[in-house]
């Protein structure tokens, strides 16, 4: 069975962009529910990684709950209360793809605002370059060969409604300015170049 990972920071650490109330509902209720549902859909003793479960799953309940379990854990790690900046290598890739960090912010916010209904907005590496993409509902990047996620932001209304109401654009702008975990993005960018391991969900534990 899979465990719900703890948040890597305190519930009030991401305020004011993401409140403690939002994190309690989002992590303790929404994310927990996906992990519980996932555990109800896999066989006891199934020792596959969550990445393998997601890649093997047909469209439907198992895929949706497994991918949402993964996406949320990666989302928590995509944020940090410690403001940082991309490494020199990642900054060069950002400059090549978007001009500069402001250009990346514009691309990220525009993609997220333009995404209809629920889903996720991602900074990804593919073919040695950076791209901003979005996926619908539970869909993630694990099913896209050659794509490595660097950062993700949740576009479901439960991610921002308590704090920003219907202002998805305001949420995404504030999120990009304050919260991206550039250390994670750096590690993922290196992994995409074949150096080091990409982020993985914690291994399953015996029930
Ligand atoms: Mn969510």
Image: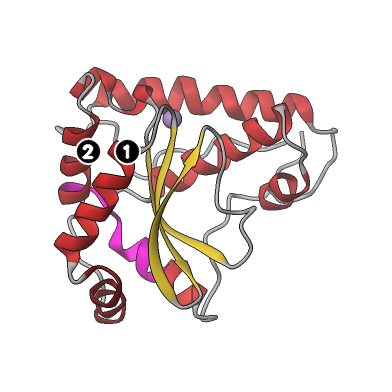
Q: Quadrant of residue 142?
A: bottom right
The prevailing secondary structure element of the residues shown in magenta is helix
- Residue at screen point 30% across, 56% down: 181
Q: Is residue 180 shown left or right of residue 123?
A: left
Query: 97 above or below 112?
Result: below
Rendered image: mark on residue 79:
none
Q: Is residue 146 above or below residue 51?
A: below
- Residue 171: x and y in percent read 21, 34
Mark 2 CB in 8 Å range of ligand 1? no
For the question of whether residue 183 can be seen, the reply is yes
Residue at the location (55% across, 71% down)?
197
User: Is residue 80 something that shows in the picture?
Assistant: no
Mark 2–mark 1 distance (CA, rounded to whole Å): 25 Å
Instruction: Sort mark 2 into few (<14), some (14-19) or many (20+) by Cα contacts within 10 Å.
Output: some
Above or below for 122 versus 23? below
Magenta span covers which residues?
A: 178-187
Image coordinates for residue 47, horizontal then vertical, percent: 80, 47
Rendered location of residue 33, percent (x, y)? 57, 22
Query: Front-most of 71 and 21?
Result: 71
Q: Dot 1: what SS?
A: helix
Task: Name the quadrant where ligand 1 sits.
Answer: top left
Q: Is residue 109 left or right of residue 50?
A: left
Q: For residue 42, which quarter of the picture?
A: top right
Element class at badge 2? loop
Q: Quadrant of the C terminus?
A: top right
Number of the label disc, if any, that sits on residue 114: 1
Provide the residue designation for mark 2. Answer: 14
Q: Residues within 10 Å of mark 1 (few under 14, many from 20)?
A: few
């Amino acid at each position: 069975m899979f465990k719900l990972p703890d948040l890597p920071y305190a519930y009030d650490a991401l305020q004011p962009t993401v409140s403690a109330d939002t994190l309690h509902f989002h992590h303790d209720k929404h994310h927990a529910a996906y992990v519980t549902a996932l555990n109800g859909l896999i066989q006891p003793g199934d020792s596959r990684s969550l990445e393998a479960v997601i890649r093997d799953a047909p469209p439907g309940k198992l895929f949706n709950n497994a991918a949402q379990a993964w996406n949320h854990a990666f989302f928590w790690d995509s944020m940090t209360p410690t403001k940082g900046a991309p490494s020199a290598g990642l900054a060069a890739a950002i400059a090549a793809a978007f001009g500069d960090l402001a250009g990346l912010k514009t691309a990220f916010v525009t993609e997220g605002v333009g995404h209809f209904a629920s889903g996720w907005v991602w900074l990804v590496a593919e073919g040695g370059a950076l791209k901003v993409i979005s996926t619908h509902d539970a869909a993630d990047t694990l099913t896209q060969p050659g794509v490595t996620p660097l950062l993700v932001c949740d576009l479901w209304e439960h991610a921002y409604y308590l704090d920003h109401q219907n202002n998805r654009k305001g949420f995404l702008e504030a999120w990009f300015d304050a919260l991206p975990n550039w250390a994670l993005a750096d590690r993922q960018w290196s992994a995409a170049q074949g150096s080091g391991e990409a982020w993985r969900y914690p291994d399953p534990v015996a029930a």
